[in-house]
Amino acid sequence: MNLVLAFEGAHPHRQARITRVDEGSGNLRRAYEEMGSPAYPTVEQIEELKRKCELASPATVSLNAQKQMSIAVPPNGVALVELG
């Protein structure tokens, strides 16, 4: 889904940081299934799941002159937008 976010008010922000959770970032289910869905994961498997589920670094996006930005959010995805 493509979204256009418009920000109102007298805020001085010109950029936003976007942190995502979707199929490619922070997806515990996918990582668990890729390792075979063990009923009782070992300590090593749990550590591997933690590594594979780390969120990607936030992306920085510039707001346009109308204080708007576009963002694509895939199905079953979530995006956190922080003005900064």
Image (spheres, rainbow, N blue to C red):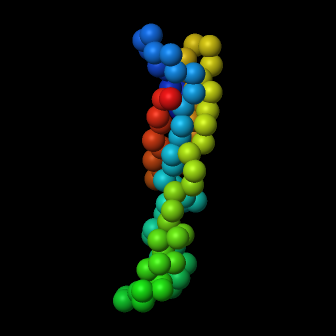
One can see residue 70 in this view: yes
Horizontal side of 43 relative to 52 (left or right) equals left
Residue at the (45%, 68%) spot, across then down:
28
> How many tags in the picture?
0
Horizontal and vertical percent position of residue 40: 37, 89
Q: Is residue 45 above or below residue 58?
A: below
Horizontal side of 55 relative to 43 (left or right) equals right
> Which of the 4 image quarters holds residue 39?
bottom left
Horizontal and vertical percent position of residue 61: 61, 33
> Which of the 4 image quarters holds residue 80?
top left
Horizontal and vertical percent position of residue 81: 47, 36
Residue at the (48%, 86%) spot, across then down:
44
Residue at the (50%, 29%) spot, across then down:
84
- Of 15 and 79, which appears nearest the observer? 15
- The residue most toward the left is 40
Q: Is residue 6 above or below residue 59?
A: above
Q: Quadrant of the N terminus?
A: top right
- Of 12 and 70, which appears nearest the observer? 12
Horizontal and vertical percent position of residue 46: 44, 80
Q: Is residue 14 above or below residue 60?
A: above
Residue at the (47%, 34%) spot, across then down:
82
One can see residue 37 in this view: no
